[in-house]
Amino acid sequence: MSRAPPTLLLVEDDSDLRDALVEILLAEGHTVAATENGDEALAWLEAHPCPALLLVDMWTPRKDSWRLLDALRREPRFADLPVMAISSGEERHPAIREVLAKPFDREALLAGVRRFVHPLH
């Protein structure tokens, strides 16, 4: 019996970028859940098993990515969830393990993801 590919949770408010990132990650063999903002991501996390990696855009219009990361730090079941921030700034949050600086290319994205998650194919 084969295992399911690891699930990545993506938080990105720009629908074109979100769709492009999902396409790239799916092509690499990952399962991807995508949300538009931190509130949607938190609802997804409450309803599903913990993903293998959280990719989060830190500068959404609602600025709720910070609240999402604060909430994750308070919840023991997410203590080991790696967080890769997608950002054009230098901001840091204690939950962030890596920052993918905008603009970035496909290889930089995949190299960052591979540091935390290995696809099955």
Image: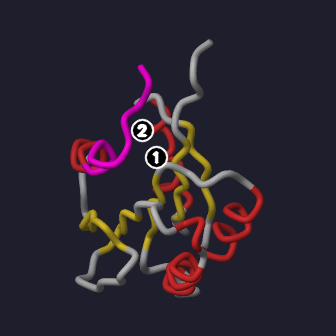
Q: Residue 91 carries which label?
A: none
Above or below, comparing residue 82 to residue 22 in the picture: below
Query: Which one is in front in this view, the residue at disc 1 or the one at disc 2?
Result: 2
Secondary structure type for disc 1: helix
Quarter of the picture holding the N terminus: top right
Q: In the rendered image, which quarter is residue 11 located in?
A: bottom right
Q: Mark 2 points at which residue?
A: 24
Residue 13: x %, y % from top left? 55, 69
Q: Tags 1 and 2 in contact by the CB under 8 Å rule?
A: yes
Local SS, label 2: helix
Residue 71: x, y in percent? 59, 82
Mark 1 lies on residue: 20
Quick check: 5 above or below 8?
above
Q: What stretch is highlighted in magenta?
A: 112-121
Q: Residue furthest top?
A: 1
Residue 99 position by quadrant:
bottom left
Which amino acid type is marked by label 2?
Ile
In this rendered view, identify the residue nearer to me: 18 or 38: 38
13 left or right of 90?
right
**Which residue is at the far right?**
47
**Does residue 113 show up magenta in the picture?**
yes
Residue 5 rendering spot, x and y as whole percentages:
53, 31
Image check: 73 left or right of 47?
A: left
